[in-house]
Amino acid sequence: MSDKELFSFVPAKGDESEIISAPLYSYWKSVGRKFISSKLAIAMLVLLIALLLMSFIQPIFSGYTVINSGKIDDFSLRYNYPNFRDWFGTDATGQSLFDAVWAGAKTSISIAMLATLISTFIGVIVGAVWGLSKSIDKFMIEVYNVVNNVPQVLVLLVLSYAFGSGFWNLLFAMCVTSWVSIAYQIRVQVIMYRDREYNIASRTLGTKPATMIGKNILPYLISVIVTIISNQMPVFISLEVFLGFLGVGLPSDTPSLGRIIADYTDNITNHAYLFWIPVLILGLVTVSLYIVGQTLADASDPRTHQ
């Protein structure tokens, strides 16, 4: 058999040498695959979505208000245990605990979400500048040392009494110092990345600090930021509940999980469902937020991708 029959010449294709044989990598698809691989996280996400929908939609239809004397004369509606009509039962005035719990959860979750977003936004921006600028570092370290040694609960109590009760006053009190600890965490991460070879080369070429922060550093900190958010939301909900339990922070006519739990503390042994159902809803919200947030933080870390 001749060489021409055994072999055939293939024309050269210059474009093929530029094609990488490795599979294409998509960061967000990898995050999604990693997240949905956890069955517990998926279950908690479904639970969290259901809780959020109930908290933000149900109060619209119920029209619940804290002060409602419309049913106070109907003794048959008082202290009804959970049933098919009143799923969580009724209290001493005949009001539905189901309506009260979801109206309170709406307030508590709203404050926690806003406080988390505001604190994280300020903390990430300040922390990035703090870590990149050595001239600012000395001043901000002293600010951090002062703020970090003052208990946040004490700051909240002082500001709540100083500015009075109110949704926005409480939100301001929660955000006024909470961003400092977030900024410190971001500062530590930025210091780890700012002196790497590509950032040194970028500074040598005259890249602006804002561009370095936005393109060279923060994209590597997505998992850190998600972790901070997942930790902060349950903390802010717990702080609001604690202040509501003490009777400060929000006006008396504003429902919240903390105020509801405080109002029904006397029923912990007598008609215990009035106390334990709000506590159970609070626990479900905080636990689901934490598990979903931590799983998403792990999934957003490229080192966990295969």
Image (cartoon, helix red, strand yellow):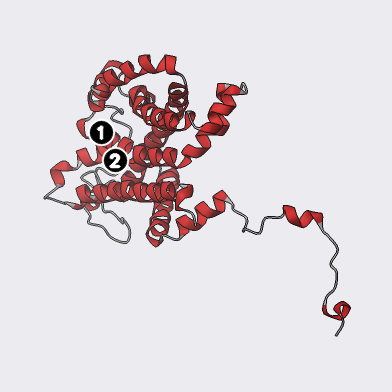
- The answer to which image quadrant residue 130 occupies is top left
Looking at this rendering, what residue extends furthest in the front direction? 2
Amino acid type of disc 1? Gly
User: Helix or strand or loop: what does disc 2 sit on?
Assistant: helix
From the top left corner, tell me how far across and down residue 30 is, in percent: 53, 54
Q: Using the image as rendered, state which of residue 301 and residue 54 is in the foreground.
A: 301
| Position above or below: 247 against 8 | above
Q: Using the image as rendered, state which of residue 264 and residue 116 is in the foreground.
A: 116
Asked if one can make out residue 256 in the rendered structure from this viewpoint, the answer is no
Q: Where does label 1 land, which residue?
A: 244
From the top left corner, tell me how far across and down residue 174 is, in percent: 34, 27
- Say which residue appears at 24% left-offset and 43% top-offset: 93
From the top left corner, tell me how far across and down residue 163 is, in percent: 31, 17
User: Helix or strand or loop: what does disc 1 sit on?
Assistant: helix
From the top left corner, tell me how far across and down residue 181 is, in percent: 34, 28
| Position above or below: 39 against 208 | below
Q: Using the image as rendered, state which of residue 269 and residue 201 is in the foreground.
A: 201
Q: In this image, 71 relative to 206: left or right?
A: left
- Say which residue appears at 61% left-offset and 21% top-offset: 206
Whole-Å distance between the Cαs marked 2 and 1? 8 Å
The dot on residue 257 is 2
**Circle 2/circle 1 CB separation < 8 Å:** yes
Amino acid type of disc 2? Leu
Q: Using the image as rendered, state which of residue 190 and residue 18 is in the foreground.
A: 18
